[in-house]
Structures are given as structure tokens and as C-alpha cells.
Image: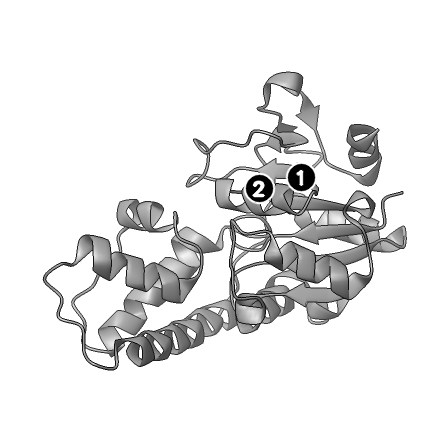
Amino acid sequence: MLKALLFDVDGTLADTERDGHRPAFNLAFKEFGLDWDWDVALYGQLLAVTGGKERMKYYVENFRPDYVKPADFDAMVAALHKAKTAHYTRMLGQGGIPLRPGVKRLLMEAREQGLILGVATTTTPENVIELLRHSLAPDGPDWFQVIAAGDIVPAKKPAPDIYVWAMQQLGLAPDECIAFEDSENGIRSSLGANLRTVVTINDYTREHDFSGALAVLTDLGEPDQPYQRLDASGKGERGVVDMARVQAWLA
């Protein structure tokens, strides 16, 4: 029996990566006097690594062999990430980043039916809360019974730990939940936690491997903007993802 819907955030609830996190990183770099600049194409490569602090370290190791690390490099990265989060939340407060098609509609329907909502993400709790508050509803964070985010577990996606932790907090088993993801690292994480998973792709992830997904979609769809299904088992299917559709897929 389905009891809970667990959502990734960046790229799944909203297209935050390209036009939110990326420019926020660049503002932090500028603030710290660094000549680092992540354009759209480069950021697509960096998204292979989950976690902002991990992403910066990966960038230095793989793209900036000329950069001489200071003795307190780890502390600097942590400070950079804190500054980046501040820039990102300020951007949200100035107008928000819109939720993806169908997200608010599905969340509202699930709540009306008494289902539990949860978040499982590698982004920081502050980022999640501000996105939900500004892009969903002023009480958006309260819609979710668990917000598993950031460094709450040591191993980030594609490790399954964040989903396992979320389910532990809810006291639920994998067969009582369904996950919503947007990336290969995300679905590796959810499948590793034995969760059935619906994928909504975005510009950065459309070429990823989503083997094992329950369904792969362009988005969750709206009545005037239906999703298109992309996986072989349902290719060409169009519609909106509502709870009836989810239950039919699970059956």
C-alpha cells in the first residue's frame, strides 16, 4: 500500500541547477576573489558529482591544475559553500525559481488523499526550505513530514543512504513509498534503497541512464501541457501524473 511520496529537489521539484545554483556559485567565487567561472556547459559536467562542497573540490582537481590550494582549503570550501547558499536563498527571495510543471498539483492531491510527503536530497536544508517557502507556499516546508537534506548522512547520492534515512524517520518500508528523481545519480540512489522511481528529465540529464525506472517522463504534466513518456515500455504516452496514474504504474 502506497503511503509516501519522496522527492529529490534540484532538477525534480524545480529547475534550480542551471539558473539557481550555478550563478550562486559564481557569485560566491567572485566574492572570494577567485577567477573560477562555471558556464552552462561546464556545470553540466560538474553535476556528475553530488554535493556542492564535493563539486568544488572535483572542479579544482580536474579542471584547475594551476590552482594552488591554501593550507585551509577544506575550510575555504566550506566558507564558499556557505556564501553560495546565502546568494541562492537571496535569489529565491527576490522572486523564486518556479516549480516544474505538475509538481504543485501532484503535491496538493497527495496531501488531500492523506499521503505522506518527504524530501531526499543532497542540497542543504536551507536551500530546500527557502525553495519550498518561496516557490510552493509560505507554509511549504510544513507539507513535508521529513526533509532529509545535505550532510545528514555522510555518503551522498548515488549512495542510497539519504533515502534509507528518510524512510527510517517515517517508519516506512520501501514498498510503501515511491521516489521522484531527475538524474542517474538520483535513480541509482533510490533504486539502491529499493524504491520504485519515477524520473522527470531536464536539460542536464536527458542523456542519463535511467534503467530500472518505473517511468521516464519529460515532466509531471499539466492539463494544458501534458507530459510525454520517454521510456520504451510506455514511449509516446501523454498525460498528467496524478495519484490515479501513479497507482496504475505501481499495479
Q: What element carries label 1?
A: strand
* 251 vs 105: above or below: above
The image quadrant of residue 83 is: bottom left
Spot occupied by residue 234 in the image (x, y as percentages of width and height): 66, 19
The residue pinned by badge 2 equals: 187
Q: What element carries label 2?
A: helix
Tell me the amino acid under the disc marked 1.
Thr
Q: Residue 197 carries which label?
A: 1
Task: Please tell me which of labels 2 and 1 falls first in the chain.
Answer: 2
Q: Which of 102 and 190 is in front in this view?
A: 190
Spot occupied by residue 33 in the image (x, y as percentages of width and height): 18, 77
Q: Which residue is drawn at 50% across and 45% down?
A: 185
The image quadrant of residue 118 is: bottom right
> Would you call the spot at circle 1 few (<14 residues within 10 Å), some (14-19), or many (20 or more)?
many
Tell me whether circle 2 and circle 1 mark residues in contact (CB < 8 Å). Answer: yes
Spot occupied by residue 109 in the image (x, y as percentages of width and height): 82, 49
Task: Farthest residue to the left: give it.
Answer: 66
Tell me the amino acid under the disc marked 2.
Ile
Spot occupied by residue 62 in the image (x, y as percentages of width and height): 22, 53
Residue 168 visible here: yes
Quarter occupied by the C terminus? top right
Q: Residue at x 60, y 51 (%)?
A: 160
Q: Which of 203 and 45 is in front in this view?
A: 45
In the displayed structure image, the side of residue 2 where residue 142 appears, left or right: left
Distance, label 2 to label 1, CA atoms, is: 7 Å
> Would you call the spot at circle 2 few (<14 residues within 10 Å), some (14-19), or many (20 or more)?
many
In the displayed structure image, the side of residue 196 where residue 88 appears, left or right: left
Residue 144 visible here: no
